Amino acid sequence: MSQAPIPDDDSVVPTRYWHRLEDGRVQCDVCPRFCKLHEGQRGLCFVRACKEGQIVLTTYGRSSGFVIDPIEKKPLNHFLPGTPVFSFGTAGCNLACKFCQNWDISKSREIDTLADQAPPEKIAQIAAQLGCASVAYTYNDPVIFLEYAIDTARACAERGLRSVAVTAGYITEAPRREFFAHMDAASVDLKAFSEEFYWKVTGGHLQPVLDTLKYIKHETDVWLEITTLLIPGLNDSDEELHRAAQWVVSELGADVPWHFTAFHPDYKMRDRPPTPPQTLQRARQIAMEHGVRYAYTGNVYDEAGQSTYCHQCGKKIIGRDGYVITHWDLDENGKCRHCGTPCAGVFQARPGDWGARRLPVRMARFS
């Protein structure tokens, strides 16, 4: 556990999900890691700590940066396609993935990483002012800063903005209920379909993630999409992909979109080669063979694998070139214009035109 100093300012706020132990320590109950902390210690996530005998969040109102992204980058292909999403994260993470692609943020142990300061109301105000359709809690996992994310989601809802969680889904039952009650969409990482991978490569467990996926799908109105980063030799075997696909269809249903994305060597896993495009295409095919209606490839150029097709007539209904929408054949009710079959998702009458732009936002420029 980290002993990094806990600041004494407005970024430190009390939390709810914890309890005291008989030995004098305090246990954080937000995620299945259940960090048990002495006074002054931080949990593995770095942002939750024990101060004055309780668990506090130490990064409220502080971010590692704000960026307007295409919603497709989260990735979400069936939630307000083509629209801009105001995206931000904080620091730290409650998993320890050796392949982390955002390790400079999620593994940060420096408060200086949190260069931008913004209360929830300011985030909502600026996101609306800049024409965003939604706000995403991303880059590191929002479940570890859920108090900040929930307050921001409330402020966004008051301005008609949707909230998007980009998460590994590693959270316990009670905070899961509260957190997702304020989300409109979720992109959840299903990092593998083996307990061995989760334990050895991420330091976590598979079952809590499966529980989160089932909860979102069956007990909320949150729009759900899944992402799996395929790492050569670790989680890309046909056997594992077949098991995962069978589980997704039987437990979540055929309409949950599934993104297979390419790994590139990073952080503590530089000895593995990048994922070949053929691996992503094979995974997509396996998923579709099991009945997944909307399977996609990501982080590679593959227009066919990134476009959306009607599961009834097979016609292309949303064409994509990277993050740019090139073709739109849904009617104003989200139905295929060729056969009238509904496409699962949250759609506007017309797609947005944000394209592939990435626009950093400096909050200090806004009064």
Image (cartoon, rainbow, N blue to C red):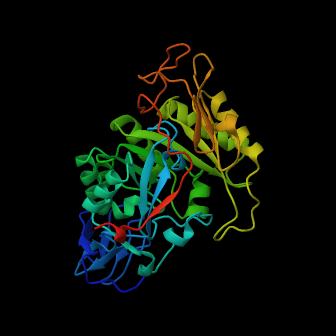
User: Residue at image x 39%, y 41%?
Assistant: 216
Where is residue 351? Give x, y as percent.
47, 34
Q: Is residue 92 left or right of residue 268?
A: left
Where is residue 19? Give x, y as percent.
25, 68
Whether residue 286 can be seen here: yes
Whether residue 1 can be seen here: no
Q: Is residue 26 left or right of residue 297?
A: left
Q: Quadrant of the N terminus?
A: bottom left
Quadrant of the rendered structure where residue 46 is? Answer: bottom left
User: Furthest-top residue in view?
Assistant: 339
User: Residue at image x 38%, y 45%?
Assistant: 133
User: Residue at image x 32%, y 46%?
Assistant: 161
* As drawn, 299 above or below 26: above
Where is residue 358? Give x, y as percent.
53, 56
Q: How many marks?
A: 0
* As drawn, 328 above or below 16: above
Where is residue 24? Give x, y as percent.
26, 80
* As drawn, 265 above or below 109: above
Q: Is residue 167 left or right of residue 157?
A: right
Q: Quadrant of the C terminus?
A: bottom left
User: Residue at image x 53%, y 67%?
Assistant: 96
Q: Is residue 227 left or right of residue 28?
A: right
Which one is nearer the viewer's eye here, 142 or 49?
A: 142
Which one is nearer the viewer's eye here, 46 or 127?
A: 127
Which one is nearer the viewer's eye here, 322 or 292?
A: 322
